[in-house]
Every structure is written in C-alpha cells, then in structure tokens.
Amino acid sequence: MRKIIVLSFISLDGVMQAPGGPEEDTSGGFKYGGWTFPYFDEVAGKIMGEQMKQPSDLLLGRKTFDIFSNYWPQHEEGWPGINEATKYVVSNTLTKADWKNSIIIKDDIVEEIKKLKAQDGPDLKVWGSANLIQTLLKHDLVDELLLKTFPVTLGSGKRLFADLPAPRPNLFFVYAILCDDGSIYIGQTQDLSERWNQHAAGYGAEHTKLRKPIEIIHYEEYITRELAVKREHDLKTGFGRKWLKREWKAGRTRQAGGTIPVAFKLTDSKVTPSGVIVANYERAGEVKTGSFV
C-alpha cells in the first residue's frame, strides 16, 4: 500500500495558489503570485531539499504538471531523481506527455488513484495541484499533509481546504464558477462541495470539461428546487450575467472565505506535546512577492 502525501505552501487564510512566481497561476485574476519568495530562508530551503530528495513518485494536476515539465527536465541538479520518478498527471484534456516516465490518468480518476494506492511502490507525493487535492480530500485519499504556513493573508485564490456550506435537506444552491478563460459557468445543486469536486476533477457539466474551473465566485440558497431553477435561469440571461460580473468585481458576491491581503511577522511560536501550533503574528505591511526563477 502506497501513501498519498500532499505537500503545500499555504497562507494564513489557506490560499495555496501560485506560491513560486508572478506568472505561475494568474487564473481568477490572482495577482500575488510568488508570495512565498520574501519568506524563503536557508532553513526553509534545507527542509525543501530534504523533502525533494526522498524517493517517491509524483501525482499532479494538469497545471502543475505543465509547470514542472517545462522546467525540471533541464534543471535536474536542483531535484535529483525527478526525471527518473514516475509522474502521474490527472487530466481529461491532455493526450500526450513528453516528460520522461509520465503517465496520464483521464478516465474514472478516483478509482484509478485508488488502484495506484493499493500497489506496491514509492509513496505518491502531490505538489501544487489545488483542484486535484480537493478531489483527494473529498474521497479520503490523503494519508499525510506536509504544510508550510507563511505569515501572510491573500484574500482570494485557490485554497487547500475549500470553505463551502454543507448540504442540508430541502436546501438548493445556485452557484457560479469562474473558469480559466474568463467565462462563468452557472448551475444549481443540493451539494455544493460535491459539485465543485466534480468540476475540479474534470467531469460533470460539458462547459467545465472544456474549460478549467478556478473558483466558486458566488452562491445562493433556496428552499425549493423550483426557486433554484428559476434563479439559475435568471442568472444565465444576458442581464443576469452582467449583474453577476459587476457584483463579483465589486466584491459583493457571496464567496467561500475572504480576507484582506496583508503581510505578518511571526513574533513567537510554540508547539505543544499534542501537536497544537501556537503562533503570534504582528501586522507587517503589504503583501510582497518575488520569483524563484
């Protein structure tokens, strides 16, 4: 049995999008790419090096795979063994992977990953891959979390743990998803978390099979399906879409989470014997960014 180990950089408000550079992932209008760079020191680099040199295979989402495959084949000295490791990439649109030892998973994704876990072999490490992680967490497939929390809040962006309301009897959600081409998909469901995971995994509505879902930018609750269907229809009209885009850009839509972007300074920290992390943070100005390449 192999473990699935998720390694993530996260902000204090749980955002994990584009930690390494400004152009890494700008989807959804994210403008703080490279937010980990100002905080990376010798100790953090040493920890990263130790984690990277441990034998493992990789389990990656499409976007992270594209970033890795465009960089690491020419820079293996920075990650010895990366090109020899098996890379499993989860994608419904990728048809060919030229990076050495890469395997595409595109059909019945959850069952295929369960089969991988059941095999003998190195552990499967997940780097980046925000949407894939949501699917893994939803189906209880994550064995370990190796997290590095940085003293900054980012307000918006892809989160490690999606903050969505739980389903309840006789409650229906109308929702809007921003896609990577700037379009907005509108639908209705009784289980918002499950529907998001379907879109993120690349199945469900035909619209998000062709376009990559970024985040839920708005949702509303209704006590009957009839009311939800009517509201869904209203939002899909030209006027409804204009209203939705205007309200979202003005920050007035109902979204999961939401904080003010700001940097902090760690002034004190302790770890209790039971694993509780006690940390004191002081405000330290605006968010700063940078790039590792």
Image (cartoon, grey):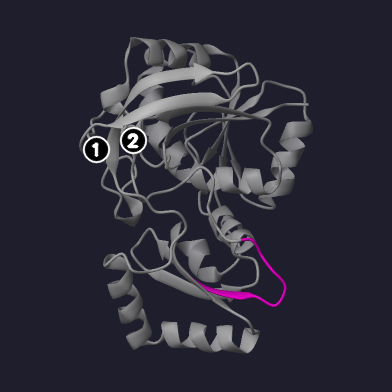
Per the image, the residue denoted by label 2 is 152
Count of all numbered marks drawn on residues in the image: 2
Quadrant (top left/top right/bottom left/bottom right) for the C terminus: top left
Q: Is residue 136 left or right of residue 29?
A: right
Q: Is residue 253 left or right of residue 121?
A: left
Residue at 32% of width from left, 15% of height from top?
41
Q: Is residue 141 left or right of residue 103?
A: right
Q: Nearer the viewer, residue 62 or 242?
A: 242
Q: Name above or below for residue 33 compared with residue 247.
A: above
Q: Amino acid at mark 2?
A: Val
Q: Is residue 293 visible?
A: no
Q: Is residue 286 visible?
A: yes
Q: Name above or below for residue 114 compared with residue 52.
A: below
Residue 3's x, y, as percent? 70, 27
Residue 67's x, y, as percent? 39, 36
Residue at 38% of width from left, 49% of height from top?
157
Residue 214's x, y, as percent? 43, 56
Q: Which numbered disc, 2 or 1, marks the residue that appears first in the sequence?
A: 2
Labels 2 & 1 near each other (Cβ < 8 A): yes
Which residues lie in the magenta part? Answer: 166-176
Q: Amino acid at mark 1?
A: Val
Question: Which of the 4 image quadrants contains residue 89?
Answer: top right
Residue at 50% of width from left, 64% of height from top?
208
* Residue 287 numbered mark, or none: 1
Element type at marker 2?
A: strand
Inter-mark Cα distance, 2 to 1: 7 Å
